[in-house]
Image: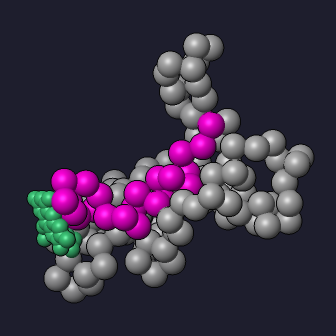
Amino acid sequence: MKNILHIISSPRKEVSASRKLGNAIVEKIQEKYPDAVVKDRDLTVSPTPLLDEAHINTFFSPAENHSSEQQSISKYSEDLISELKEADIIVIDSPMYNFSVPATLRAYFDFTSRAGYTFKYDEKRTKRLVER
Ligand SMILES: Cc1cc2nc3c(=O)[nH]c(=O)nc-3n(C[C@H](O)[C@H](O)[C@H](O)COP(=O)(O)O)c2cc1C
């Protein structure tokens, strides 16, 4: 059984091209894997916050020193990462906004791209290596 994580980032609903395309891709995958479980993460309904100082301090400090606020920040990020790691297939619907992705999607990447969780540095810290 495949787990599909469907990440949605357009604030537009009915007229959204990226949602239409993403839904069509998910349907195609379901044709191939009829028992696939689809989980939607609509970033316009539950937006990931923009990175602030408290978030950065949490992500770059050892867990054993975390305050209760930092523990809850870390847990929020770790829950998003677990959801990502549980997925066999990830479908991301994204408009292009000013030659990039919407801020909601960028914020999601900032909370899920974490050293020791989703990537690690090589010995010289010059390269990022993917962690599964
Ligand atoms: C604020 C904003 C910025 C945009 N910037 C770009 C852009 O840089 N390049 C581009 O090709 N299209 C750009 N577009 C067009 C959108 O990518 C296009 O309308 C797309 O269909 C939006 O996705 P959606 O239909 O899923 O909402 C922009 C649209 C908006 C609203």
The answer to which quarter of the image holds residue 26 is bottom left
Q: Is residue 75 visible?
A: no
Q: Name which residue lies at 27% across and 84% down.
A: 13
Q: Name which residue lies at 62% across and 14% down.
A: 123
Residue furthest top in the image: 124
Q: Name which residue lies at 58% across and 13% down.
A: 124
The spot of residue 27 in percent (x, y) is 30, 65
Residue furthest front in the image: 53
The answer to which quarter of the image holds residue 100 is bottom left
Q: How is the image coloured?
A: one colour
The spot of residue 91 in percent (x, y) is 36, 56
Does residue 36 show up magenta in the picture? no
Front in this rendered view, residue 74 or 1? 74
The spot of residue 6 in percent (x, y) is 41, 63
Residue furthest bottom in the image: 14
Q: Is residue 8 above or below residue 116?
A: below
Front in this rendered view, residue 35 or 81? 81
Left or right: 5 with respect to 65?
left
The spot of residue 101 in percent (x, y) is 29, 58
Left or right: 66 with respect to 91?
right
Does residue 95 show up magenta in the picture? yes
Magenta stretch in the rendered image: 94-115
Left or right: 27 with respect to 68?
left
Q: Is residue 117 above or below residue 31?
A: above
Q: Is residue 78 visible?
A: yes
State the quadrant of the C terminus: top right
User: In which quadrant of this rendering is ligand 1 seen?
Assistant: bottom left
